[in-house]
Every structure is written in C-alpha cells, then in structure tokens.
Image: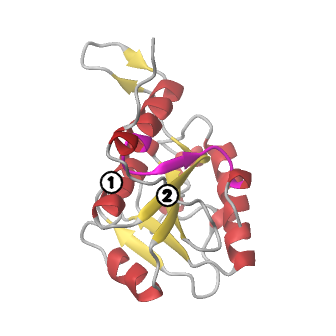
C-alpha cells in the first residue's frame, strides 16, 4: 500500500523547525495521577523521564518554559490541592517558570497561555506531556490555528487504552500511534526523542 502524503505536504506548508533554543517548551499535565494514580498510564514513567531531560535541556539553553496543570474538581483525580493533581517532582516548576491552570483539554481555551507566549515573543513551541489523544492533540491543534509552529516529542508523551464504539479495545500503543499520526498530518511536527531536536 502506498503511503499518502500528509495534508501539510499536500498544502505545501513547511515542516516546523525543531530547534529547542528558538522555542518555548510547554509541559502539559505532567501530574502525578498519570504516574501512580487513578489515571496511571502505560509508559508514563518513561515519558516523565524524557520530559525531565527535555526540561533540563530547555533550561540549560535559556528557552522559556511553561507548565500547564489541569485543575480538576475537588476530590477528583486531577484535584491540584491533592497529591494526585500535583505536577510530578521530576518536572516541577522552578524559579519564575509560569504555571497555567486549565479546565478543559485545550491549554489555550479559557487561559492566558496565548497572551503569555505572545509576551515572550514565542512563535515556535515544543510540546510534551499527557494525554496524547486529549490535551496534547487539542493543544497542538489550537497552536496551529493561532499561527504557532509546533513540535511534539513523542517519547515525552503517553496515553491510555480506549474502547472503540464497536466494543473493541484499542491498546494504549494503538491510541498513541494513531493520535500522533493525526497530529502530524497537519498540526505539528513529531520527533521521537529530545536528542532529535536541534539546539
């Protein structure tokens, strides 16, 4: 079977540059519930380790870093006043790194993220975090619509198994691969590892 061109290629749009030093790093929902809580994800520990490496590189290069935390209802699996909703220790904010609180899947919806990035002069974004089929995908789409050039580090993301409407269960790996394929078709570039980003 012949592999189709992406929609981005068919439209003649350039691939976003993956330079970490020329981008703002956005860490999406790197919260404890995905590591050891009710929403624990397959591969989340490895993803946080890669996100930690990505964060260290961004800090070393002086790139802007923004943390996005989902503020769930009190008592929920994303209650930020509880351990489950807190940002994982390996990637917790440092110094004056801003934390954007959101209440929907899209990190731009109803938040000041766009205004913050505009204030930083950021036009290129690097995304990592959870979950790939929800927050990562929704944020990448909004970033594209707002004119940002976006790159996702795949190994610094993870998601969960989902039930298809037919009753079939799609594995976490199947959902991960499908979600990234949908993103790369138009909205963002996807690289596997932090090492795949240029400095």
Quarter residue 5 falls in:
top left
Would residue 53 appear left or right of 71 to someone viewing this image?
A: right
* Quadrant (top left, top right, bottom left, bottom right) of the C terminus: bottom right
Provide the residue span drawn in magenta.
184-194
Residue of label 1 = 141
Residue 29 percent location from the top left of the image: 47, 58
In this rendering, is residue 140 above or below 113?
A: above
Residue at 44% across, 51% down = 188
Q: Residues within 10 Å of mark 1 (few under 14, many from 20)?
A: some
Q: Is residue 162 magenta?
A: no
In this rendering, is residue 6 above or below 28?
A: above
Residue at 61% across, 43% down = 44
User: How many numbered circles does the render carry?
Assistant: 2
Q: CA distance from mark 1 to mark 2?
A: 14 Å
The numbered mark, 1 or 2, whose residue comes first in the sequence reads 2
Nearer the observer: mark 1 or 2; the answer is 2
* Quadrant (top left, top right, bottom left, bottom right) of the N terminus: top left
Q: Identify the residue at the far front of this view.
A: 12
Would residue 75 appear left or right of 172 to someone viewing this image?
A: left
Helix, strand or loop for disc 2: loop
Whether residue 118 can be seen here: yes
């Amino acid at each position: 079977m012949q592999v189709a061109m992406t929609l981005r290629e068919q439209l003649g749009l350039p691939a976003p540059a993956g330079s970490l030093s020329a981008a703002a790093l956005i860490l999406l929902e790197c919260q404890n519930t995905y590591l050891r809580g009710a929403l624990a994800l397959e591969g989340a520990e490895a993803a946080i380790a890669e996100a930690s490496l990505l964060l260290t590189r961004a800090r070393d290069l002086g790139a802007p870093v923004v943390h996005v935390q989902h503020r769930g209802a009190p008592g929920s699996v994303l209650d930020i006043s509880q351990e489950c909703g807190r940002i994982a220790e390996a990637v917790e904010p440092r110094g004056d790194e801003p934390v954007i609180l959101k209440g929907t899947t899209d990190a731009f919806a109803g938040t000041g993220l766009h205004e913050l990035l505009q204030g930083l002069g950021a036009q290129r974004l690097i995304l990592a975090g959870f979950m790939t089929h929800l927050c990562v995908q929704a944020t990448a789409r909004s970033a594209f619509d707002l004119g940002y050039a976006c790159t996702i580090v795949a190994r610094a993301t993870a998601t969960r198994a989902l039930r298809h409407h037919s009753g079939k269960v799609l594995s976490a790996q199947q959902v991960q691969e499908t979600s990234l394929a949908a993103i790369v078709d138009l909205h963002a570039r996807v690289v596997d590892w932090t090492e795949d980003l240029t400095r």
